Image (cartoon, helix red, strand yellow):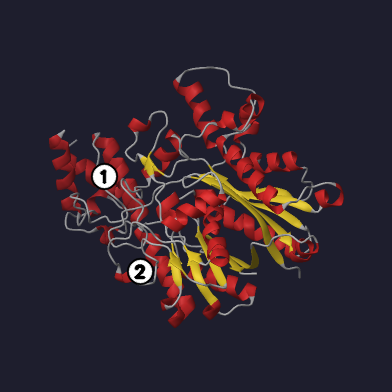
Amino acid sequence: MDVRTQVIEIIAEQAMMEVGDVKPEMSLEDLGIDSLALVESIFAIEEAFDISVPFNANDPNASDFDISSVEAIVAAVQGLVDKK
Amino acid sequence: MNRVVITGQGSINALGRSVAETQEALREGRCGIGPLEFRDVERLAIRIGGQVRDYDPELHFNRQQIALYDRFTQFTLLSAREAIAQSGLSFAGDLAGRTGVVLGTSGGGLNTQDDNYRSVYEDGKNRVHPFVVPKLMNNAAASHVSMEYNIKGPGFTVATACASSNHAMGLAFQLIRGGAADVMVTGGSEAMLCFGGVKAWEGLRVMSKDACRPFSANRNGMVQGEGAAVYVFENYEHAKARGADIIAEVVGFAMSSDAADIVMPSKQGAARAISGALQDAGITPEQVGYVNAHGTGTAANDKTECAAVADVFGAHADKLMMSSTKSMHGHAIGATGAIELLACTMALRDGVIAPTIGYEEPDPECALDIVPNEAREAKVDVVISNAFAFGGFNAVLALRAV
């Protein structure tokens, strides 16, 4: 399974949505993912890809890990997987 | 209703091994946060904390006691020893039955759990020490205080996460005020700085890797601490009759529940606890000179707390001082309200307001006088101490100078 499919599956599960309803341009707010669900998503991503995501819930926008949209998250995870 | 006063206080925490040492550090704005030292620390992403360093239990307790006392119980007993000695009380005859103990903790004997889980899961051992259960239970510390000092009245432990010791002290206050006890030994203890204790917090992604900077725009999270503080609360008439030295009066207490989110704080919930404590004490917002903030150094807490204080105090919010001493001793979870009450008694008794250290950049959403970086001399008559817990349980105490 590629990174995109896996990330979208994780996001869909947290958002309690069908995988097909998660669109690349959607933001976390669009998806109804709150701060707790975001922390859980990041945990699931770290476990799935065996990577470490730089993320501090105090200031989610401070790190290089872009969470502005589904597409951005996929790209950021891909970047971390490539660096492994 | 009976008036309630404080006639003894004791503590051990990252800033000192006694109240005098702790308050000296608070006056000097000293930071007790540093590199953590314990087994497997290298497997943590977060490696700083407000640890009680170079602590040797054998200097204080014998081998049989150490077999029974988890670190959180040891901290409690050391603090209780100092507080009860200062009060000058001994609990014999009728007073034993009229004295109680109520303490707060969140994790209880977490070091004992951590050590023994490691032993059975990681080391594969099939036998644990016979005292694991009595050592790890949350009420162990309160029970040992009762046994050590012959305290035979109400005794129990309160666990409301970061508000545990404020809830405990509030209940102790109510028990004396309502006549169920004449003396209460109260406060809280926490010893969560072990591999499992810090690893669990890491998971929430709210911890700072470098410093606790409450209310500063560049804050990046909380830092855990550990320790205990214990007080002797006493019926005012009882204290006066025996000529006791009175440290401060406890005048009000209120609790509220957010009924909203398991981790995110609520401005309304916090504001209801603060205004409830003032109402309970019969004081007006304008009388309050100092607020000991919950001030965890997380974005969620600090903004919400400042907004709640601004709501309750209105224009007076710009005149009062508010500081978070967690910047110095770390967030001692279930003990934190008790340790922080030392900043309140220092303000009332010595006229010194403990600072919020690590303050580097103003945050427009926290635009109150947070006593940045240096302690300040000021005469205050009434103070409050905030605690807002995960789970949405809030507890605020109000104290007055005597």
Q: Disc count in the image?
A: 2
Q: Position of residue A45 (x, y in %)?
A: 27, 41
Q: Mark 2 or mark 1: which is in front?
A: 2
Question: Which residue is drawn at the image coordinates 23% and 41% (left, top)?
Answer: A6
For the question of whether residue B262 can be seen, the reply is no
Comparing B40 with A83, the one in front is: B40
Is disc 2 surrounded by few (<14), some (14 to 19) or many (20+) residues within 10 Å?
some
> Quadrant location of the C terminus of chain B?
bottom right
Left or right: residue A57 versus residue B348 is left
Q: Amino acid at mark 1?
A: Glu
Disc 2: host chain: B
Q: Position of residue B73 (x, y in %)?
A: 61, 39
Left or right: residue B315 versus residue B74 is left
How far is disc 2 from disc 1 in space, using C-alphas?
Answer: 39 Å
The relative height of residue B286 versus residue B99 in the rendered view (above or below) is below
Disc 1: host chain: A
The relative height of residue B325 versus residue B376 in the rendered view (above or below) is above
Q: Look at the numbered disc 2 and give the secondary structure of its residue.
A: helix
Comparing B179 with B137, the one in front is: B179
> Quadrant location of the N terminus of chain B?
bottom right
Q: Look at the numbered disc 1 and give the secondary structure of its residue.
A: helix
Q: Position of residue B300 (x, y in %)?
A: 37, 60
Question: Which residue is drawn at the image coordinates 78% and 66% (left, top)?
Answer: B237
Q: Position of residue B47 (x, y in %)?
A: 35, 39
Task: Check disc 2 and report the residue beneath it.
Answer: B366
Task: Check disc 1 and report the residue beneath it.
Answer: A9
Q: Amino acid at mark 2?
A: Cys
Left or right: residue A20 versus residue A16 is left
For the question of whether residue B159 can be seen, the reply is yes
